[in-house]
Amino acid sequence: MKLEPREIVDQILPHRIPALDLAEAYAPANIALCKYWGKRNEALKLPLTGSLSISLAELGTRMRCRVAETDGLEINGETQAPDSKAFRRLFSFLDLFREAGTCFQIQSTNTIPMAAGLASSASAFASAVNTLNLLYGWELSDRSRSILSRIGSGSASRSICPGFVEWFCGEQADGMDSYAEAMDVSWPEFRVGILRLSDAEKAVSSGVGMQRTMDTSVLYQSWPAQVERDLPVLREAIREKDFACLGKTAERKAMAVQATMSAAWPPILYWKPESVVTLQGVHRLRADGVEVYATMDAGPNVKLLFLEQNRDEVQSAFPDLQVVQPFGTTCQD
Amino acid sequence: MKLEPREIVDQILPHRIPALDLAEAYAPANIALCKYWGKRNEALKLPLTGSLSISLAELGTRMRCRVAETDGLEINGETQAPDSKAFRRLFSFLDLFREAGTCFQIQSTNTIPMAAGLASSASAFASAVNTLNLLYGWELSDRSRSILSRIGSGSASRSICPGFVEWFCGEQADGMDSYAEAMDVSWPEFRVGILRLSDAEKAVSSGVGMQRTMDTSVLYQSWPAQVERDLPVLREAIREKDFACLGKTAERKAMAVQATMSAAWPPILYWKPESVVTLQGVHRLRADGVEVYATMDAGPNVKLLFLEQNRDEVQSAFPDLQVVQPFGTTCQD
């Protein structure tokens, strides 16, 4: 039995009649601490392993959707052509939710660069689901919205929640047990540093890179076992606020993902020259006793993990750093 | 029973009385097609797996050794202090061969940069053994010289021979079956391109990098099995002159070695920003149909593998390329 995405959506949606003419909602981007890398089902974006992330608070996507006579898409104020990749990908996702004949004018505003390994598709699809949820008046649970977002872009399942978020692998063929949930941990001192090394669109999309890695990389074979071993370590480090353990495990997982890509054929190397400089800068800072860790994704950008107490040292080593406070402002600010 | 290097050397040398006052010999550097990465015995440099390389003809080390009143070392015309790393490493190796009281004035000339992942220690130790072989009049076989060179620097075992060279892992505790041998293949069109991205000495030596990787990298676990699978593929590709298979296998093995390092802790990243630019340039050339492959070692430099027929395209993409003809000049030159 092949499950179609629209059938899954049917099981979740109470109806397909818009309750409003206009709605607007937001979803944060998220940075993987243990990345989603490998699918067991392409159409439903069902993963081979669980994954864990931190949501980026005010960095994400705000989407505004108006019921209209024709479809239209504006991203950051720029009109997208109907044959553009962004238009086609978003509207074929929206088609899962609407009746034929319902059209949308969408305005999407990203506070995070697109398609550069900074998880813009995660916040885009999650914000689309949040927006439709308001527009149609569905009042869906976090879990349902996570499942629906996942069908748009796997890691979007995690952008439904704030803070530390775990996406469960699940076992069911219909994916109803593959959703994300926020961990009940607040860590006000936790910081994510964004270093925007490139806004250029990637030569190889995440989806293509993931598939090629699964198909051709001998190093991918050990990935699922690695995740099974390290997810509990990460979970425990977050609960215990053991930052050194969290940072080290996340950095090692990020490097292991890059390794699986480099062993693919043709090899996938998302790095820019600045990626090397940045990683070596992080290694040096750490050798000097500053607790800072690096993560990377399917892109050239490097994200830093550190605590408020080391903010000055990290910021002076990386003057262009954009510092995100995933748990909002603290008393000191 | 712990085997001391000097006992092994004793089994090989017929005597320790110099036959000449002065001798001079050469050994080429070599580029791994399947790298030596992991030891089973530190003192004797016994490897965990076999390995395979191409010797670099005129790029290597010429060593001149004169029996003298005191020890002295000049490298590329520069006198090295007795407490320098190069001096200490070379003379503690030479101590294995000489009687107490015998002193050497050594002049070493490298045509390849030192300690930048361009295998200068391999040619240095192999040329030392070749020089002593003449100085003492030992008339040692290739196999014996390979074993002796290996004790100085593992991959030096391969620098005894020209062309494609295989170093057998061996099983014996004394390492008498762990030596290198030239493959009986001449491939006049085969080219190695050297891109000297950095002559700077490495922050982490190969030996330290190898040990840290063995001790801490989860990705190292599958390395021996990968080599066991890929060495026969490389051997066959060389015999059949299947360049695409040779190049692809060598590039994948090189990337897999880098991957084992990146998964070590602290992570090892020998790359320079130019390493990324160069690798991506190779990927692009290949996407354009030019058969060129990259290899890397424990260092930032990138080495290219290609055939004479693609020399112009490769050279115009990489104007600084130094082209080596491992099998000498061909009729066309």
Image: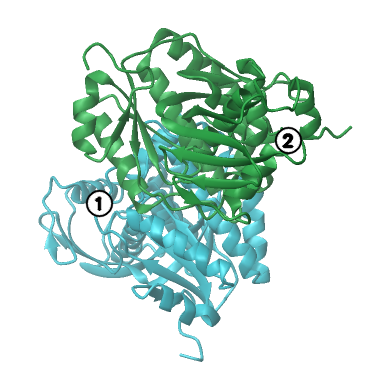
Chain colours: A cyan, B green
Does B80 sit above or below residue B117? below
In this rendering, would A112 be left or right of A185? left
Q: Is residue A39 visible?
A: no
User: What is the crowding at mark 2: few (fewer than 14 residues within 10 Å), some, or many (at least 20)?
Assistant: some
In the picture of the structure, the residue carrying the numbered disc 1 is A201
User: Does residue B240 show up?
Assistant: yes
Name the element at disc 1: loop
Which one is in front, B81 or A224?
Answer: B81
The residue positioned farthest toward the bottom in the image shown = A332
In this view, the residue in front, B23 or B14, is B23
Residue A60 versus residue A197: which sits nearer the camera? A197
Q: Position of residue A14 (x, y in %)?
A: 39, 55
Q: What type is the residue that disc 1 sits on?
A: Glu
The quarter of the picture where the N terminus of chain B appears is top right
Q: Which residue is depicted at the point 22% across and 33% down?
A: B315
The percent coordinates of residue A10 (x first, y second) are: 38, 46
Foreground mark, 1 or 2, reads 2
> Which residue in the structure is indicated by mark 2?
B96
Report in which chain the residue with disc 1 lies. Answer: A
Mark 1 to mark 2: distance in Å? 58 Å
Residue A292 lies, in percent from the top left, at 53, 69
Relative to A277, does residue B180 appear above or below in the rendering?
Answer: above
Secondary structure, mark 2, is loop
Q: Chain of mark 2?
A: B
Front position in the image: B265 or A162:
B265
Q: Relative to B116, is A263 above or below?
A: above
**Amino acid at dot 2:** Leu
Q: Position of residue A295 (x, y in %)?
A: 47, 59
Q: Quadrant of the C terminus of chain B?
A: top left
Q: Residue at x 46, y 70 (%)?
A: A192
